[in-house]
Amino acid sequence: MPTLVKWTGADAELAEDPFTAVDDDQTLPRGDVIISLTRFQAEGEQLLSEGRKIGVRVEADEAVEALAYDLPRIAVVALVFPKFRDGRAYSAARLLRQRFGYEGQVRAVGDVLREQAHFMIRCGFDAFEPADGSGPTDWAHVAARFRHVYQRAADDRTPAFLERQG
Amino acid sequence: MYRYDEIDRAILTDRVAEFREQATRRLAGLITEDQFKPIRLMNGLYLQLHAYMLRIAIPYGALTSAKLRKLAYIARTYDKGYGHFTTRTNLQLHWIKLRDAPDILEHLAEVELHSIQTSGNCIRNLTADPHAGATADEVDDPRVWAEAIRQWSTFHPEFSFLPRKFKIAVTAAATDRAAIKVYDIGLRLHRAEDGELGFEVLVGGGLGRTPYLGSTIRKHLPTRHLLSYLQAILRVYNRAGRRDNAWKARIKILVSSLGAEEFARQVEEEWEREPRDGVDLPDEELARIRAAFAPQGFETLPPVSAAFQSAKANDRAFARFARHNVKPHKVPGYAIVDVSLKAPGETPGDCSADQMDVVADLAERFSHDEVRVSYEQNLILPHVKLDDVPQVYAELEAAGLATPNIGLISDIIACPGLDYCALANARAIPIAQDIAKRFADPERAEVVGELKIKISGCINACGHHHVGHIGILGVDKKGEEFYQLTLGGSGAEDAEVGKMLGPALPADKVADAVEQLVEVYMRERAEGERFLDTFRRTGMSPFKEAVYADAR
Amino acid sequence: MTMKALTANRLDDGEAVFWMGGRWVDRFAEAQLWGDQDPDADAAEAHAKSELTQVVDAYLIDVIESEGGYAPLSYRERVRAMGPTNKLEHGKQAEGGASIEALVHAHGAARSTGRVNLIKRK
Ligand code: SF4
């Protein structure tokens, strides 16, 4: 089971991951699973009716809009970073949180590095599968680096221009 | 001039601490170069041919004397006593040690400078009209908006890993001194018929391997919606821009493949869907930023200065300086003074630490403490009393900074090229030096008139060669340096991409070719025509014939 | 005859350096040279790449004879070994001498960048 780092809103902690990530060509195990968007579109109804929790993995070139109507039924949206330099998932996370009001878990998977903790949290990610061996202390450390921010994003931090108004 | 408050300062301090920690980890071998490289690049630290290069951001090209003095101090203490001003109005130091970099960033932070977002696929340091706040032909001060964008784009969580780097330029004047048509986003402030201030928004300009001029996707964007509109553009680009091929990843490729209309439609749709509150700045914040740029300390003076007039009448060299390096100011009795970093034989854009100190002193004594950097790699003293211009001239002259050649043939843009840059194919600086020396006689340069030569050492086009009246691109032919000439480009309001003259020339033939081109122009030119005008009228053939005559 | 040398930039200060029997030296004139097919060159390169704290971006370059000495084949590598041509007082060339002269007067570049294993470096 890969390490899962969770962001609580103030701190990062190590978490058990009840979900099994399943590739399209694998048979489904029991219990809670994270499956691809394609598989979700084909088998999602069936799986949900079995009463298990479902997470959906959205690749960088897939549009989160495709999930819009299903979001209330999805426990996890796992956004893929094929490379840490590929920043599409940041937009996807903000859309999930800010446009679609998604309240489930938004998980960063793929080439997920601690140096990006601050940006990810700001865009609405709250769970991470680090690819660089980092753990919750690293994530908490990076997340706390900046005392102020300039823009409003998907987190609840007050941007500088509002702080200035007191 | 905008001054940092506690919040701005804290953000910068936190950044310096972050980099110090990262660099320490790297030097100790706790992280690999693969992991560290993107981090150091995000702090403007490149590895070049001879050493590390630190690219320091000069937001919208605006410096104070304290900032410039600090740059001089850093150049002297941590480098070899000089720096290189670039076409992005940044300052590059070419001999930096990684182990010194955290200390340098700390020094910079003391004067509200940094190297944030001078590299990487993020929103880069932005450029603005260097005459902002001084020129009569602007409808507003573009620095207000440039500062708003600076803050919004700094550490933007969504837009720090774009498909490719992203550059924004702002102007508020009819004369384009910021080359906004060759930027990813060019913003031109103007007034609508009803008087409302707004931006014309151009997207998809850029040089490099495939040069494009920006397309207008919105004729009038009310100023208060600037940031939400930028967010919409960046979001469309971040999601749809190509990531499979770095050469096709700039927004210009997306705009041209979708077509400007379709791109605009997608931006408008995104913009309509997203709440603007919380993105667009509240009026109070805009007012706070605006106040920082309010004109200050201008005296009421007669429009004509006796001292200035008599100096012109009595000193031919001064008169020439006044013709080329002194520009009208919006306040009567004041002038904008260009400081040339293009003395023939010197490296274009290079400025020694001593020269920086001279300019800083002049700014403090004579120019409201302000200095600007132009993308043409010169410095500007924006607010000099006409009465003081002779004195300023004398001191600049003594420091080798008064070459009267702004806009003339020896005012050449050149990137660092193969003398420093790890990406280069050929040298750019020695070519510029060769040409400038041929036209070192100011009399001759003046007769030739406005002629913009721009040189890049590779297709990345940092030297803007595509938009030079004469553009020169260094190419590599089997390990030897060759140069491809283009004619008829322009980076100003009449922007155009230059056309290829003919086969590439060896290094030692380039200055000859430029002389031949100038001869053709002098022969063909009609009354009042610049080189560019003559070229546009006659077309390529007379020029081509002259340069390749021997080859036939 | 073409030969090979191993070059890199030092991590700490970015200086262009050359491999000489187990250590990195500043001067190209002191660089170890290998015959074109010598497998030791590749072994040295592999070693340099696996090491974390000394240098960055190690790669082999082609070297030719010049003025009785040696010079990198490509112009780019010669600039690294000398210093910038617009400021002769900066870089390694500042110290002058016969080995620098050999670099200054070298000509006859054949391969675009003079970097061997350009593709592999990606
Ligand atoms: S144009 Fe090429 S050679 Fe010149 S600075 Fe840019 S990348 Fe380097």
Image (cartoon, coloured by chain):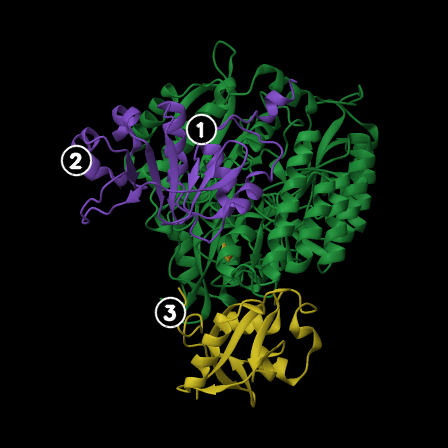
Query: Residue placed at 67% from the left, 52% from the top?
Result: B102
Between label 2 and label 3, give the one nearer the viewer. Answer: 2
Q: Which chain is yellow?
A: C
In the rendered image, what is the letter of the chain coloured green? B
Q: Residues within 10 Å of mark 1 (few under 14, many from 20)?
A: many
Instruction: Name the subunit of mark 2.
Output: A
Q: Chain of mark 3?
A: C
In depth, the one of A58 and A161 nearer the eye is A58
**SS at mark 3 in the image:** loop
Classify mark 2: helix, strand or loop.
helix
- Quarter of the view holding residue B283: top right
Residue B69 bears which disc, if any? none
Q: Position of residue A128 (x, y in %)?
A: 42, 42
Question: So how many labels did they put on this image?
Answer: 3
Marks 1 and 3, Cα distance to the nearest angstrom?
39 Å
The disc at residue C120 is 3
Query: CA gap, disc 1 to disc 2?
Result: 36 Å
Q: Position of residue B231 (x, y in %)?
A: 44, 28
The purple-coloured chain is labelled A
Q: Is residue A126 above or below residue B115?
A: above
Q: Is residue B165 above or below residue B152?
A: below
Residue that appears at 63% across and 29% down: B132
Residue B231's tag is 1
Foreground of the two, B131 or B3: B3
Q: Is mark 2 within 8 Å of ligand 1?
A: no
Q: What crowding class fits label 3: few (fewer than 14 Cα within 10 Å), some (14-19), or many (20 or more)?
A: few
- Reading the image, the residue beneath label 2 is A43
Q: Which amino acid type is shown beneath numbered disc 1?
A: Gln
Relative to A33, B337 lies left or right: right
Q: Residue at x 37, y 39 (%)?
A: A88
Counting from the top left corner in percent of width and height, residue B295 is at: 72, 22
